[in-house]
Image: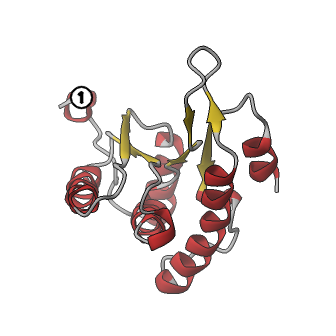
Amino acid sequence: EQYIKDLENPAINCISIKISTIYSQISSIAFEQTVEELVAAISVIYRAAKANKYIEPRSGKESYKMVNFDMEEYCDLAITVETFIRALSKKEFKDLTAGIALQAYLPDSFFYLQKITNWAKEKVKNGGAPARVRVVKGANMDMELFEMRERHWPLAPFSVKAETDA
């Protein structure tokens, strides 16, 4: 509800969302159900982004408001990307540009960048709006280290800054 209110505010042209704020039962074990629930939830927000256009104060140009997905934990990476692609693949959002952040410190982000890029190229080729990808350093290293130690798992992110930078 707060995201909808924010999108209704004429002064706001962009919001960022973490999937855990729109659906609290995220589970990689229930991948399909989780993605379906998230697509339904983000669709409501995308509809509000289209219904409440932003008017650029200087030029008067109208545009849909921007909704960005921020990335959370490594375990939510595949779910977040799949939700992003499936929701924006719906016919009603063909003309909507939205964004997603990928964390550079996760080696898997490169694979998902390729997946998003290939999907977005097809979307644009078929007359749709482009997608935006923001590559960020990554801010969840503490959680990744905690899970690694607690569960005796290998570290998901790159452990050396130079690898992340590359």
Q: 11 left or right of 95?
A: right
**In the rendering, at what x and y percent does residue 82 appear?**
40, 69
Question: Looking at the picture, does residue 20 appear above or below residue 49?
Answer: below
Which residue of the protein is positioned furthest toward the front in this rendering?
A: 60
| Viewer-proximal residue among 143 and 164 | 164
**In the rendering, at what x and y percent does residue 70 appear?**
52, 46
**In the rendering, at what x and y percent does residue 161 appear?**
28, 28
Q: Residues within 10 Å of mark 1 (few under 14, many from 20)?
A: few
**In the rendering, at what x and y percent does residue 106 appear?**
32, 48
Question: Looking at the picture, does residue 3 appear above or below residue 20?
Answer: above
Residue at image location 34% in from the left, 54% down from the top: 156
Q: In what quadrant of the picture does the C terminus appear?
A: top left
Given the image, on which type of amino acid does mark 1 rest? Answer: Asp
Q: How is the image coloured?
A: secondary structure
Question: Looking at the picture, does residue 161 appear above or below residue 117?
Answer: above
Residue at image location 24% in from the left, 28% down from the top: 165
| Viewer-proximal residue among 71 and 127 | 127
Q: Secondary structure at mark 1?
A: helix
Number of marks in the image? 1
Residue at image location 47% in from the left, 49% down from the top: 98
Q: Which residue is mark 1?
A: 165
Q: 50 left or right of 95?
A: right
Q: Quadrant of residue 33?
A: bottom right
Q: In what quadrant of the picture does the N terminus appear?
A: bottom right
